[in-house]
Amino acid sequence: MKLCDTSVLVDIDRGGVADRVARLDDEGRHAISTVTVTELRLGVNKRYTDSATRQDALEDLERLLARFEILEVDRAVATAAADIISELQQPGTPLHDLHDVYIGATAMVEQLSVLTANVDHFDRMDDVTVVDWTTF
């Protein structure tokens, strides 16, 4: 099982990655973080201002999300996220995205690799194995 970053679901939704989706499906069920649910829902809310169109997009989103196990941000993930933030801030390099820290922390706690198109957002996190979606 892999933890799929938001970038993976965005690509799946946009299409054109059928070969990678087939490979992902062949591996079995995969997971996403509740943070990814937030990011995707926010994207739909921003993109669609018409309520009927937004509702259709949200229904499509729910069908996409149903393909994945959704992992919660719990106390263990929050603790791991705090440790990651502390480590990343020591060298004085800014964080790319706090959402990615929580996704990385979820991967650490659940002992999963992160599948992402944004490898550079995760490769500085110790103890997080990253798989590049663009070459998956």
Image (cartoon, grey):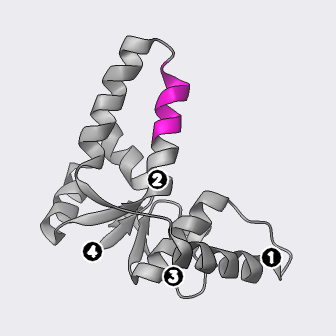
Q: CA distance from mark 2 to mark 1?
A: 23 Å
From this view, report whether residue 74 is shown above or below residue 96. below
Disc with the residue nearer the chain's start (3 vs 2): 2
Disc with the residue nearer the chain's start (2 vs 1): 2
Q: Is residue 15 visible?
A: no
Span shown in magenta: 41-48
- Check residue 1 in the rendering and tell me which mark sits there, or answer none: 4
Question: In the image, what residue type sits under mark 4?
Answer: Met
Q: Which residue is mark 3?
A: 128
Secondary element at image label 3: loop
Q: CA distance from mark 4 to mark 3?
A: 14 Å
Query: The N terminus appears in which quarter of the rendering?
Result: bottom left
45 is within the stretch colored magenta = yes
Q: Which residue is mark 2?
A: 36
55 is within the stretch colored magenta = no
Q: Are marks 2 and 4 in contact (CB under 8 Å)?
A: no
Q: Are marks 4 and 3 in contact (CB under 8 Å)?
A: no
Q: Which residue is mark 1?
A: 89
Residue under the point 53% across and 37% down: 42
